[in-house]
Image (cartoon, rainbow, N blue to C red):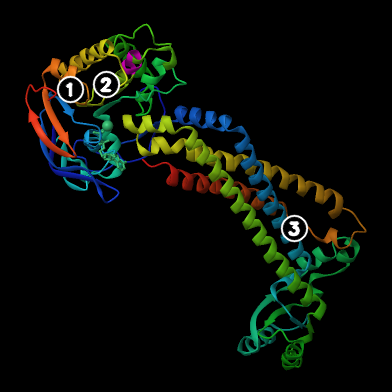
Amino acid sequence: MAGSFAIRLAASTNEQKGSGPDLVAIRLDYVAKETGSNLVRNITLTLASVLTVAIALAFVGVSYLIGVGIEGSFGGLQSDVRMFVYMNPTATQDQIDSVRKALEKSPQVDSIVFLDQAETYKEFKRLFKDQPDFVESIDPKELPQSFRIKPTSTDSEVVSAVGKQFEDLPGVYRVEYASKLASDIKRSLDTLNGWITKFGLALIAVSVMLIFNTIRTAVFARRREIEVMRLVGASNWFIRLPFIVEGMVQGLIGAIVASGLTWSFDVLWKRNFVNQRGLDLLNNITWESSNLWIAVFTVLTVGAVAGAIGSGVAVGRYLRV
Amino acid sequence: MIKLEDVSKIYKGEHIALRDATVEIEKGEFVFLVGSSGSGKSTFLRLLNRAEIADKGVIYVAGKDIGSLPSYRVPYLRRNIGTVFQDFKLLPNKTVYENVAFALEAIGRPKSAIREAVPQILDLVGLGRKDGSYPHELSGGEQQRVSIARAFINRPLILLADEPTGNLDPATSVGIMKLLDRINRTGTTVVMATHDRGIVDTMRRRVIELDRGRIVRDQARGVYE
Ligand SMILES: Nc1ncnc2c1ncn2[C@@H]1O[C@H](COP(=O)(O)OP(=O)(O)O)[C@@H](O)[C@H]1O
Ligand SMILES: [Mg+2]
């Protein structure tokens, strides 16, 4: 194999003994050449699948960012929290611990999250980020620590009855409840989220199908070559690999375009809404740059995987070796 | 080299294309398979390179039971078996050189080895100066020579030929037979299905006759009928 790159796809064993896969050396330049010429040969179909992948994944990336933004702007409401138990800033650790025990014991409490002063201050800063003077004036030590509680029931009367049990415990400052409006918004957002997820999955499924179709067409267009390759003893993977790579390249190119679109969305959104005053609802919807990276990484991975699945199935169905 | 024990092939669960065939072919033999159309000649050949799998019986090629070969091993079997067809199966968008080189590329041979081997084999089949031509620019006989070059470039142990002269006129056929004979003299076992009475009667090699899937005659230095 002098002078050529070789991937060893399978462990080398002694061919004479016939005891396992022989080493399959596949030249990278060959795969690159075949993949390239296939992509060009079928330019219309290739463009259609690349474009579909791009649209599907841009939708996924953008809705992920908006989702993160909305979740952040609605704070605790997003996680079905319907009740807040605020402690006095002066409450002792013993008092906090006994309230926690009482909450944990209560059968009407599904789950609790405790926010200490540091976390409370972080959230406080975020909620009032456009009033820095106000933030400055607050000492973190003055902020009340709190429990966020998800009750087992969603009925507001049951919830306030539950809350009453904790109002008089030592160290408790006040019990508050999520408003009915907030929980309604939350429920609508959950429904919307479900629909967006389904739509995103449907778009990805369509992308996989288009890649599948492109690869099936490519297999058909090259059936003479495939027949000859089989005849002269090309290994199964040697025949399949260029098609699989072709599918993955289509998925990846689509994903790269989608990443670009998601990134532009990030830039435009932040420029037009987040750093502007006056748009109270929209400028609260924002996300960290780490979320953008998660979106891009996800989009690229899903693109490559969708391409591999689409072409893998096409090759498995139409390329009998 | 090739051994069939009680081999039957039944297409689609009913049509019996080969019945209880038992036959042994030694290394270096030249064997004609004769019989009317539909008698099972192609099926016989297709079983040998595992283009088909026997429904009954055992087939040994070079000592190996090829029926029990896992599918990922089949390509390695085929590297030892060259195949030639009536319709040549050349790739129309590749030149003579590229068509032959393709057989080596497909099994991952390095470029340097390909550059050395292809001109040699093209000289052997008498097409040294046609390497840049496309198949449609060649006569039928020349196209068959290209396909033989492609089948033989790996120096296979066995060459299977399914009516290789079926599309050629008698004079051209003689040239192809001379080429196959030369290949046979290098030690390659040749099994050739044919309808061509003249060729069989001139060559006087072993003849296996099939009739509706049965071997009805197996004759050394035989004739067509
Ligand atoms: N792939 C197939 N499916 C079903 N029947 C087949 C197939 N190939 C061949 N046959 C049948 O098997 C019999 C033998 O065919 P074949 O081996 O091609 O004979 P020959 O090459 O001698 O003409 C014929 O009757 C043919 O119709
Ligand atoms: Mg036939």
Dots 2, 1 in contact, CB < 8 A: yes
Q: Main secondary structure of the magenta part?
A: helix
Neighbour class for label 2 at 10 Å: few (<14), some, many (≥20)? many
Residue at the extreme top of the image, as rendered: B129
Q: Is residue B156 above or below residue A126?
A: above
Q: Amino acid at mark 3?
A: Ile
In which image quadrant can residue B29 be found? Answer: top left
Q: Which residue is mark 3?
A: A66
Q: Which residues are magenta?
A: B141-146
Q: Chain of mark 1?
A: B
Q: Which mark is residue B97?
A: none
Place of residue A18 in the rendered image (x, y in percent of width and height, measured from the top left)? 21, 40
Residue at the extreme right of the image, as rendered: A278
The answer to whether dots 2 and 1 both sit on one chain is yes
Mark 3: secondary structure: helix
Q: Is mark 3 within 8 Å of ligand 1?
A: no
Neighbour class for label 1 at 10 Å: few (<14), some, many (≥20)? many
Instruction: Say left or right for B81 vs A222.
Output: left
Quarter of the picture containing the C terminus of chain A is top left
Neighbour class for label 3 at 10 Å: few (<14), some, many (≥20)? some
Q: Amino acid at mark 2?
A: Phe
Place of residue A66 in the rendered image (x, y in percent of width and height, measured from the top left)? 75, 58
Q: Which residue is mark 1?
A: B188
Residue at the extreme left of the image, as rendered: B220
Place of residue B48 in the rendered image (x, y in percent of width and height, measured from the top left)? 22, 35
Q: Which residue is mark 2?
A: B152
**Real-space Cα separation, disc 2 to disc 1, in angstroms:** 9 Å
